[in-house]
Image: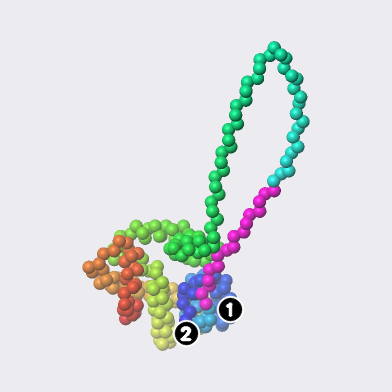
Amino acid sequence: MVTRLILDSHPASTLKKEISKTNIKGYSKMTKKQLLDVMMANKERFSHIKKKEYVPPKRTKKAEPKKPAPKKPAPKKVMAKPKADTEPKRPSEPKRPAPKKKAEPKKETEKERRDRMNKMTPMELFSQLPQELKEPIGLTALEMKERDRKLKAQKPTATNIVNEARYMDDYYEIEEIVIENIWQSLSFEGYDWTTKTEKQLERKQEQVNKEAEKFILQQIRRLVKEFLKGKKFKTAKEGATAFWKQDNIKSKILD
């Protein structure tokens, strides 16, 4: 089954091409978030879409600059021999040895690079992505780095754990289910989205998203208060991770 995360892995241009194959109209001026909302409302038409895998860019070797041809030395002038009564020349000082060149750093092999990337956190991996792959995702690299710094400094209070839980994959999976249930209830009530204009659909989608977010956060706040009784965590992120690992937590939120 196609999910919001699978669709979000593709750029907006690919999503528009997929929508153009259906009878959905008014998508040309939509933002990526609006495209995702419309596609999730009709996700049975896009079940063939798979998650886009990240392919690291190939490193190109820089061309070495050509060395200029050595210039021919100018002919030396013949100096006249000194007279016998002149002072003798002082012995020349011994030449100092040239400083040793620093050893160049060892180039990383492909296996070593893969091992290093496997040990990285998702935030560190994201910071190494090219700029063209960062832009379709909601936040820029600086915003992600600033958010990560603030979240690490947060105390494990109930409010901070709820805020951290909103950025995890489990939250987005529940959000998709709740949004789908709201649209189904609207269709049972006689709401026909095919007869609405583009602006009416946008306003309705925003209303559905806010309603789903409000419902999920109310459920999470209630369950987090019960979850924190007699438990201590070092950071809010640690508490949010433990919260989502509970048995049947998703069914409790959807009840």
Q: How crowded is mark 1: few (under 14 residues within 10 Å), some or many (20 or more)?
A: some
Image point (34%, 77%), residue name:
250
Compared to residue 96, the image places residue 83 above or below, namely: above
Give how far apart the Cα atoms at labels 1 and 2 are.
Answer: 21 Å
Residue drawn 77% across the image and 31% down it: 75
Q: Residue 127 at x, y = what percent?
A: 48, 60
Judging from the image, what secondary structure is the residue with disc 1 in?
Answer: helix
- Please give left or right for residue 171 compared with residue 57 in the image: left
| Kind of residue indicated by mark 2 | Asp
In the picture as drawn, the residue positioned furthest to the left comes out as 230
Label of residue 59 in the image: none
Provide residue 166's location: percent of width, then percent of height.
Answer: 38, 69
Question: Disc 1 vs disc 2: Cβ atoms closer than 8 Å?
Answer: no
Left or right relative to 243: residue 119: right
Colour pattern: rainbow
Q: Which stretch appears magenta?
A: 50-66
Q: Main secondary structure of the magenta part?
A: loop
**Residue annotated with mark 1:** 20
Indicate left or right for 116 with 154 as reference: right
Q: What residue type is labelled 1?
A: Ser
Per the image, the residue denoted by label 2 is 192
Quadrant of the frame with the C terminus: bottom left
- Membership of 236 in magenta stretch: no
Q: Does the magenta stretch include residue 52?
A: yes
Circle 2 Cα neighbour tier, 10 Å, few/some/many (<14 / 14–19 / ≥20):
few
User: Residue 96 at what x, y percent from top left?
Assistant: 58, 33
